[in-house]
Image (cartoon, rainbow, N blue to C red):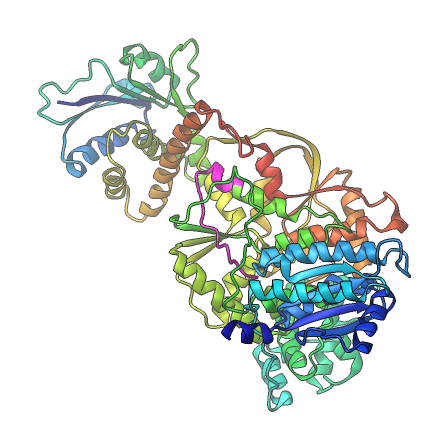
Amino acid sequence: MGNDQAKKDLKIILFLCSWGPHAAFQQLQDKDCRIPAQVKMVRIPCSGRVSKALLFKPFEMGADGVALIGCGSGACRYGVGSITAERNTADTRRILDLLGLSRKRLRLAAFSPEDPQGLLDFLNDFVEEVAAIGKSPVQRPSKPEQPADSKAVIKEIIQKHDVYACQDCGKCSSACSLTLAGKQYSPRAMANAIIGGKLDDPQVQKDVWACLTCGICYDRCPSAVNFPEFIRDVRAVLKSSNGNGNEAHGGFFGSLARTMTSPELKGRHWHWLPEDIKTDAQSKVLFFGGCAPYFDVFFKNHLAPATLDSLKDSLRLLNFFDVHPILLDDERCCGHDLLWTGDRENFLKLAKLNIEAIAESGAEEVIVSCPEGYRTFVKDYPEAGLEMPFKVTHIHEFLEREISKGSVGFKPLDKKITFQDSCRLSRHMEMTDSARKLINRLAPESFTEMQDSGAGAICCGNCGWSGCDSFSKALQVKRLRQAKETQGDLLVTSCPKCQVHLRCAMQDPFFGKDLEIEMMDLTSVMAKTICWE
Amino acid sequence: MQKLEVIITGFGGQGIVLAGRILGQAASLGDHKESTLIQSYGPESRGGACSAQVIISDGTINYPYVRQPDILAAMSQAGFDKFVDQVRPEGFILIDQDLVKPKGLDRDYFAVPSTRMAEELGRKMMANIIMIGFITAVTQASTLEATRETVTKSVPKGTEEMNIKAFSKGYDYGLSLLKARDKKASGQSGALA
């Protein structure tokens, strides 16, 4: 009886192509066949139109299974719909695996109008299979609570960041990467408008989401107005009132992070780990990897990034120094992107779950390789009033600490290198030197800084998977041109998102091979060349 | 009964005698062993090959002069040349790699850039403390805790923190060197190897 009830409670979303399969479905309805009640059908124009974000969205909302049904390969009305659907389903299934939700919860099938019985059999079989896996552990994430008095909250935010101190000098605008990329956008004008109570102005609302929060304006501001953090807090107010997060990639990464707020979710974050990497559950050091495994899957077909390499190579470097760290199999997103896109409530949920899991592991030191994760742990968790019974170290600091002990050298690197600073490390955490200390230990053919470097470096064009537009692209193009101007042949990065975003611009067909340059994370360059002397 | 004979040698002014005193004092007061120190007073201590001779023993030391050193730590070429042939076959030879060139030496030795490291730390005069750290890590003539404690007590007031930093530099370098040798011997020379 209990099993029957559990089966009855299942929620299965069926994305159904309007062409062949829907005709089959209609026949089932016309004949009054018993379509499983758990299945909620959504008509779609073509299976290829259902993006990874849309395939995943039902899981964020607590669905137990999703079926995508289109036309057979070769029969697709749009030509490549079936092929796109196959790719998107395969990638989303891999993401479900990483999350520990089981890839079996997502199925792709094709039915022609002549095969209604086949469709019915498929649906019954799918319901049985999902029932065998069980209910999804994902709880529908909470929506941000709307403040009773938004105006008063905005006033508090202005006071908290002392935005009144803005002298309207324009240094922020003259340094802002977006403004310099040609966008009609001004941080000081936005600050003044918000102080003047014009938050509802459509241009202000647009600009709040356009800000890259890269921090160059704060770096240049003579009054030390922390504009990125001001914008972050304003976004939280906007998000709670109208829910708009201006999220790129169909909001996939926001969905992903919110899905991880479910305490019952038991992920398989590290199941791809190569066998040669040594870990130890009893270690006092924990390595927190971040979302790179998801990036590699999500962008696999388009950009083929290798952000996972930065995790593998960080771990290999830890192993090199005889550190066999703890890895949390159900490691969750640190919450950075939720925080910076205004979803403070779900950010806090993730933060608490992360801290709890790390504390339970017994680790005394957490090593983070992602710049965003590092900032989030070191700055944002404590500022949110969360106590962490462990210290947090960035992998660059760890490497410098170990290498400076001596007896470590670097094999010659047959490359002319240049370096892309990440906003979170260079400006937000004032750590421009740490990467350079390591680079100076390497033995490349040459190391040349780009025209803008260190605290003045140009942002990779996007932050928190929000606000990507043609000006972001212009920024990326500008940055890659600067890299090429150094005559370098290897662009060393320190953030997985810089890899993704710069690679995106590099693959723009309009530029051909003009912007192509090899990219590698600093940890990978080090792992490749480090040796005992 | 285990007995260690140590010679620390270098130029006058490098703090060689202080280094010897720290080592002996750490062994006696910290590790509760017996120790003696003989230091050179002659013209050699004014720029020549000065030396500190330390004996550390589990039991009574009847004769304080070193006859055949188990450990030679050389911070000058002249000192190295003078004492290197006396070191026991299984003994340790440690050198400052920028000041001593062990030409023609056909046995194992341990090198540390102690003077360079001290310069990097901003005080060239702390090279001796770096060497003490290095000796402690490589030879374990005295324990880490005892030697560190003795360094703290032996240096001028107000410079303790900086000297401990120097000591740790030398100690970490020594451990790193030993680890590098082990790793290379086991065929793991790099992170991807």
Classify B186 as above or below A202: above
Against B118, residue A32 (above or below) is: below
Asked if residue A7 is positioned above or below residue A526 in the image, the reply reads below
Quarter of the picture containing the C terminus of chain B is: top right
* Position of residue A238 measured from the top left corner of the image (x, y, whole percent): 68, 80
The residue positioned 65% from the left and 54% from the top of the image is: A94
Q: Quadrant of residue A191?
A: bottom right
Which residue is painted at 74% across and 67% down in the image?
A: A120
Question: Horizontally, is B133 left or right of A276 in the view?
Answer: left
Check the image and name the residue furthest to the bottom.
Answer: A149
In the figure, is residue A184 to the left or right of A531? Answer: right
Q: Is residue A165 visible?
A: no
Residue B29 location, x and y as percent?
Answer: 15, 37
Q: Is residue A9 magenta?
A: no
Q: Nearer the viewer, residue B134 or A131?
A: A131
Residue A31 sits in quarter: bottom right
- Please state the extent of the stretch shown in magenta in the rendering: A316-333
